[in-house]
Amino acid sequence: MIHTLAVKIVDFLIKYGTAKKSRTVYIYGTECFISECIGNILLFTIAFPLHEEYRMLIWLISFLSIRIHIGGYHADSHWMCLIISTLIGASSILFNWIWSILEIYSLLILILCDAYILFTKAVVHPKHPISLQKAHRERCFLLISTVIENIAIFACFLLHYDWYAPILSGIFCAVLMALAFKITP
């Protein structure tokens, strides 16, 4: 369904001259965009009745800013990606509650996540190879994002804002995705 919709959108764009070349690349990108939109709608549909929508937004920003640079598990299909992403996003609500209850222990989780990020290489998926230069640039962006998120966590923690929990959940979930790729074949 996602693929069929993406093909129709791309064919429409090609017909009217917006997309000129690389039809398959446009189709893949459109599939990713549709899948992300569906996933985000599902996440906010889960978060809204629990009054967690602002925390979900913070989690999403935190998760994506680390996940995009650290790499990790990639599903074989858009539907599987959608299911896994939605489960991870929904689990972040539970993690937020845990971090809020165990405030001091949440800092230990942050230290463990930071150690993983600092002392391991980002995951490069075999289907998405990158040059050594790009890998170095991604590593720099990962470290910058991690430092910014750590500053935000400590500021929120010291000011007694509960926003540190979804930021920490974002880092934690991104690290879990990276570990999942290393554990699964």
Image: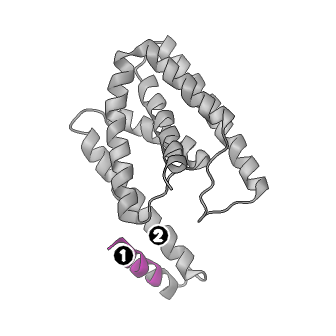
Q: Identify residue type, mark 2.
A: Thr
- 23 and 88: which is toward the camera: 88
Q: Quadrant of the N terminus?
A: bottom left
102 left or right of 48?
Answer: right
Q: Identify the residue at image location x=37%, y=33%.
A: 55
Q: Position of residue 138 (x, y in %)?
A: 69, 48
- Picture colour scheme: one colour
Residue ID for mark 1: 5
Magenta part of the chain: 1-11
Above or below — where is 52 with respect to 64?
Answer: above
- 50 and 136: which is toward the camera: 136
Q: Identify residue type, mark 1.
A: Leu
Q: Position of residue 61 (x, y in %)?
A: 49, 40
Disc 1 + disc 2, Cβ < 8 Å? yes
SS state under label 2: helix
Residue ID for mark 2: 30
Picture quadrant of residue 76: bottom left
